[in-house]
Amino acid sequence: MSHRVYVYNVSTPSEAQDTDRMMLEWGYEMPLLLQPLLVDGGFVAGNNYNNHTEPDNAGLYYAAQPGIENLKRFYDFLEKQEMLITNKEAFVEAKNNLFTYLDKLKLPYFHLDAWDVFNMDDTPHAEQAEVWLANIAHNNEIIKKAMENDDISLLNDSDLMDVSPGFASFAELLNYEHYQYGWGHIWQPFEEVPEVEIYEENGLWGLKDKDGKVLLHPQFDEFYGFGPEDLAVVSQGGKFGYVHKSGRIAIPLVWEDAYDFEYGTTSAIVKRNGQFGLIDPNGNTVVPAQYEALESLDYSGLFTAKKDGKWGVVDQSGSTVIDFEYDEAFENGHGFYHTAVKGRKNKKIFNDHFVYIGEFPLSAVESIGEGLLLVKPHKNANHSTLYKKDGTICASGFEKINRQASFPNMLVLRKGKKYGALGLRQESLLLPYEFDALIDMNAYIDSRPSNLVLAQKDGQKGVFDGDPDRPTWLFPLEDYQSILWLYENAFALKRNGLWCIAYSPENRLGGFEFDLVVRKAPVSGFAYAFKGPDLFVADESGVSMADKTLVLQDAEDIDYNYYFDANVRNRLLTYAEAAIADDGEADEHTSAEDLYDLALAACDAGDYEKAIQYDTIAAEKGYAPSMNNLAHMYYSVEGYLDDDKAFFWYEKGAEAGNAYAMNGLGICYQNGVGTAPDMEKALYWLGKAADNGLALAHTNMGSLYYEGHLVPQDIDKALWHYQQAEQLGSPQNGWLGYLHDLKGEYEKAFGYYQKDYAEGSDVGAYNLGICFSQGLGTSKDVAAAITYFHAALDREYLHAHIELARIYRNEDDFTDESLARHHIAEAEKAGLEIPDDLHS
């Protein structure tokens, strides 16, 4: 059993339907490359499928179509980045596969179900789901900023949350071959089973069903593909109509020309008597054929039309949206519309409410959202201007928008050397151009991006909330040295070199007394506050002394790397591992952390009796590292072996969250130590240890999947686990080389064999000899092969005698029968079986 994350395309939250489609089944995480799909809406509700443990069945839901569009923008952005993609051909193939797959998803929601992973923690699933919601939103904000600024360097791996720790950079994650640039995450592609077949006979076209039954005999001159409404355009004798997939002629062939029905509408363009109009799927006229030209403008049912030699815009009912007074057709500018002006480079610009804005270069116009249009500096203007929904000027005279800040309701504008903030909903300035800096605090309230901005002016700092309904100052400008958002409405304030934690200027959790405050994962508190050697934790109830066990877990948890820098991590560890100054006798009144350190010292000195004594007291206090140490001694130390006690303490330690104990418990289930063998439980606990970043657990799982005795052999899974161990700093170079060798990836194998040899491995020397003797992963070099085979013999790997005998018998320029016989004799003396090709 492993911990899986599922993503579905569903029609109804919390209610399974036959039409639901599973898109992804992945281990331990929501893959970063597909997180841009989860960008819109975002709420927590009951799972559609893992819903058998009320109330712990919370999952995440997002609007599907905006997510698909966002992912497409993301992949287009990635493709443009120079030197980012190592295999451009594979990327393009994966991108096309993803886009084709996503275009076939028709249900309105994406549902992320991480029940399996949430079950690893005692925290209620709904609370964990909120954390995932916030972390995915955080990642998407980083991705959004990178795309908006066309700057891949803003997609910094260290800033991302809950991403596989096995990668040193985003580029490394993106190019990891087994992810196939995101396509490898998809659970199962759509199987293309065409419902019907358009076929040709004697130059005419007809229609068959999937079983070959003729639905329409060949009779049409042209038969186009099926589109929306399951209708296809056909022609016969110069007349056009529509055929339904069922084989009936849905709309008679009476038109001079006909076009597909438009996505997002229920209309199709048709032509009669040289004029164009619109019909519905039943062939009824919606807009009479009265236009000289008619073209779809977008998927919202708008059309650009020509009448009496002039162009305008109509909707699918025929109502005029923009009057017929323009010389050229209209085009969609993504958030606005434009038409060319004869003899001029500028375009006439209309916003998405069809209000005329003015004539500007197309490259200078940008939709900002909420109906606002930005006109950037251009030939006739050296400043930027924002236009309201009604076409009047909202703000003008500023140089640029600060793209590093991203708020739901605010734009940060720069004018001269000062900054102001504009409210999108208000269509007016919320903060005037008088601030030295307005900085996005990247704060989340109720798991959603907020409008909290850090304002700086004349050496003072404050926090302003640009809420669309009630914009207000949370912390008016004062002489704070720094302000840090912590969690929800909690902040850290610094004054005179010391920090305090506050919800408002009046509601403070103590005074300015801490030398450092840092955010932490919002589980068992939301911030740590340092005061000399002491450490406190802040939560909704106040500030209290931090529990050393929980601090140690936070400091060692690789999933929380983004919260703490090296200095903070060292201070956390120093606090958590503080021990008594001497090694005198300890008892039940000694802290668990100190007992643990005493036990380690006793163990290093070989005094296992005392080590067991100290660890037993600490373990009975609930200290998980001591539970693991006890189990390890009972499992492996001669004179203290006790299978039942080993299993007991490994189980206790695993349940208490210690990764090493999880690994040990998995090995117990694997080998039947202190319990009956149970492969499913073995994989569960080894997988949980691996999920907690334990390289040893990955190595053990790699060995299991390679050996194939207790689980089906899977070389790819084995290699993946060994690679994860390598990324975590514990490479098994011999195994990595051997598994790449099995997959025919000889250059990679050769590189790992070199590392294995450099570490003193006898098999590593032998494997390098094989590579050089056969030209695998390197040029064939028999002399080098002989050198490495002798090195293997020096390291007492006697199989090298066989290969040396082959060289001295078969290789030109190296044949020496006496040496061949010598090595065969040595192999026989070692009890090795002599291959048939070496029998004389």
Image (cartoon, rainbow, N blue to C red):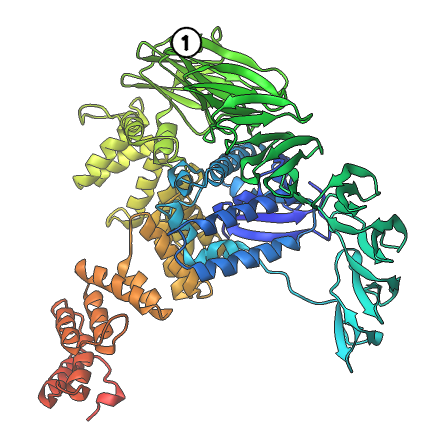
Which image quadrant is residue 499 in? top left
Q: Which residue is mark 1?
A: 510
Q: Is residue 28 visible?
A: no
- Placement of the C terminus among the 4 image quadrants: bottom left
Q: Position of residue 452 (x, y in %)?
A: 51, 21
Which of these two is toward me, 582 or 747?
Answer: 747
At x 53%, y 44%, the residue is 35
Q: Secondary structure at mark 1?
A: loop
Pick out the residue farthest to the top: 506
Vertical relation: 320 (above or below) 577: below
- Circle 1 packing at 10 Å, graded few (<14), some (14-19), many (20+), is few
Which image quadrant is residue 318 in? top right
Which of these two is toward me, 335 or 662?
Answer: 335
Vertical relation: 634 (above or below) 93: above
Q: Position of residue 311 (x, y in %)?
A: 75, 44
Q: Position of residue 640 (x, y in %)?
A: 27, 46
Mark 1: which amino acid? Gly
Pick out the residue farthest to the bottom: 840
Which image quadrant is residue 392 in? top right
Q: Is residue 242 visible?
A: yes
Q: Position of residue 189 (x, y in %)?
A: 60, 60
Vertical relation: 514 (above or below) 48: above
Which of these two is toward me, 105 or 792?
Answer: 105
At x 69%, y 51%, the residue is 106
Vertical relation: 679 (above or below) 234: above
How many numbered circles does the render carry?
Answer: 1
Which of these two is toward me, 624 or 532?
Answer: 532
Q: Is residue 632 left or right of residue 610?
A: right
Pick out the residue farthest to the front: 343
Q: Is residue 775 left or right of residue 494?
A: left
At x 55%, y 24%, the residue is 410
